[in-house]
Amino acid sequence: MMQYVYKATRKDTDGKRIVARVYRGRYRLPGDRVRDVSLDVSDKQTAEKRLGRIVLQAQRESVGLGISKAETECLARPLVELVGEFVGNKETIGKADKYTSLLSSRLLLLAKDCGWHFLGDINPQDFLDWRRDHKDKSAKTLNEFLFALRGFLKWIRRHYGEIAPNLDSIDPMDKRGRETFERRGLKLEELVKLWEVSPSDRRAIYQLAFFTGLRRAELEALRWADVMLDAAPPYLCLGALHTKNKQVAKIALIPLVVNILRTLRPSNAAGEDAVLPNGIPRNRDGLHKDMAKAGIPLWENGKKFDFHSFRITACTLLQAMGSAPRSVQAFLRHSDIRLTMKNYTDVLGLPVFEDVKKLGAMVMDESESSSRISSLDLVPHCHFVAYSDTRPDKEKPAQPPDFSRDCADTGLARLVEAAGVEPASAQVSHRHLHA
C-alpha cells in the first residue's frame, strides 16, 4: 500500500515554478488504482493525519464496512457548522446564554489551535498536545475544554452515528494544587469598614449580595417582578432560568434588605425592569477600589477577595456565630453540604482558638462537676435555637432565655448594628443607606 502528501506545482507564463498553498494526498490500496484527493490544509502534519483517516475509511469500505449516507454527509460538513448546530441544540433546550457562548468559544478555539477543519480531523493526541502546551491555564479551565469536547463528540455519535472519536480515555486534570486562586472571607471589622467607605450605590450592592447570598449573575438577572416587598414576610423569588442550580430560589428578606430595595426602586418601575439596571461593576472598577480605600488587602494568606467572596464571608460569619451547618447550606443553596463546609468556609475566620480554649477550661475546671454544665452554656451566644421546657413540673410555662442581652457583646450585634439595624427593635436605620 502506498500513501503520501504533496503540494502540487505548476509553471506560470514566465516559466516560474509555483507551489500550491494546500496539500493533496495520494494513496493506493492493494489491487486498486492510485487515488488523488484534496486535503485542503496547508499544514503538513495535519494533512498526513487527514490522509490517514481517508485511507482507513477506504480500507473499511473495501471489506464491506462502509458508512451510511448521513455519516458521510456529516464528515463532509465543516466543523464550524457542526459546532454551531450543537450549540444551537443547547440553546433550544434552555441552556443559559453565558453557558452556550463559552461552549462555542471553547470548541472553536480548540478547532483553530489544533488545526481541525472537519470532524475526522479530531483525535485524542491532538488534544493532549494542546493541553500540554497550555499549562498556564488552570486545571479547572482545561477540564472545561475537555468536557466541552466530550459533550460535542457524544452529541455527534447520538445524532449521526459512531463516526466521532471517543475521548473518555483522557483523564481530567487533578485540580488539587493547581487552583488559580482561593477565595477568602472578610473579617467582621473589614466588612463594616468596606460598607462605611463605599459609595451608596455600590454599598447597596454589597449588602444585597451579603444578606441574600445571591451570585453576581443572579443579582443582575433580578427583576422588580421577582421582589415581593409587601408580602408577609417579604421575599424575592428568582426563576429557575437565572439560578445556577436551575431551581427556583425563594429568599426571605430581612428589614435592612427591604429598606435597601425600597430605596433603589424608582417610583415608575415596571415589573420587567432590572433591580440593578447598571449591573455590577467589575471587581477592578469598583470593589477593589473600595477595598483599597478601606485599607483592606486584596490578598491575605495566599487567598484573594472578589465579589463572589461575599458568599464566603456570609458563610464563615454565620458559622462563627453558631448557625447550624444545614441552615448555612440552605442559605447558600448548595446541594451538597460538603461544598458549604469545605469550599465556602474560610477556616481562618472561625474562632477555632477561642473554642479550644473554652474546651480546655471546661475539661480542666475541677471545681464543678460535669453534670452541672448546662446545655445552654454549650450554645454559642446569639445562636437562636428552639427552646423547650425540660423541667419536671409543667405547672407554669418557662420563659425562654433573653438572648438579646447576650447579643450586645457579640459579632452578630456589631454586624447588624453596622448594617443599620438595631437588634432590640429590628428597626432599619438610614445610617448606611443615605443617597
Image: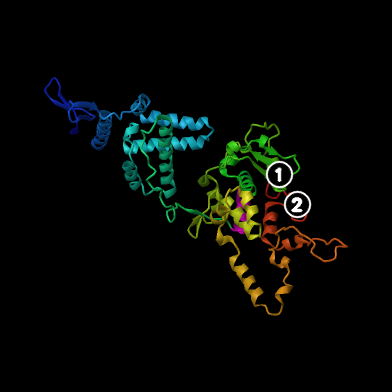
Please state if 29 lies on the left or on the right of 83 as rendered: left
User: Where residue 45 sits in the image (x, y, percent)?
Assistant: 24, 38
User: Where residue 222 sits in the image (x, y, percent)?
Assistant: 62, 38
Residue occupying the far front of the picture = 64
Q: Total label count?
A: 2
User: Where residue 19 sits in the image (x, y, percent)?
Assistant: 18, 28
Quadrant of the image containing the N terminus: top left
Q: Does the magenta-highlighted stretch encompass residue 380?
A: no
Please state if 212 lies on the left or on the right of 428 as rendered: left
Identify residue for label 1: 258
Identify residue type, mark 2.
Answer: Ala
- Eyeballing the image, is 206 above or below 77? below
Identify residue type, mark 1.
Answer: Val
Q: Give the image quarter of residue 55.
A: top left
Question: Which disc is residue 8 wearing?
Answer: none
- Eyeballing the image, is 389 above or below 99? below
Identify residue for label 2: 426
| Residue 257 is at least partly visible in this image | yes
Residue occupying the far right of the picture = 395
Q: Secondary structure at mark 1?
A: helix
User: Where residue 285 sits in the image (x, y, percent)?
Assistant: 52, 45
Q: Residue at x 49, y 60 (%)?
A: 301
Q: Residue at x 38, y 37 (%)?
A: 109
Local crowd size for mark 2, using a 10 Å CA cut-off: few (<14), some (14–19), many (≥20)? some
Majority secondary structure of magenta residues? helix
Local crowd size for mark 1, using a 10 Å CA cut-off: few (<14), some (14–19), many (≥20)? many
| Marks 1/2: CA–CA distance | 12 Å
Residue occupying the far top of the picture = 13
Residue occupying the far left of the picture = 15
Please state if 118 lies on the left or on the right of 420 as rendered: left
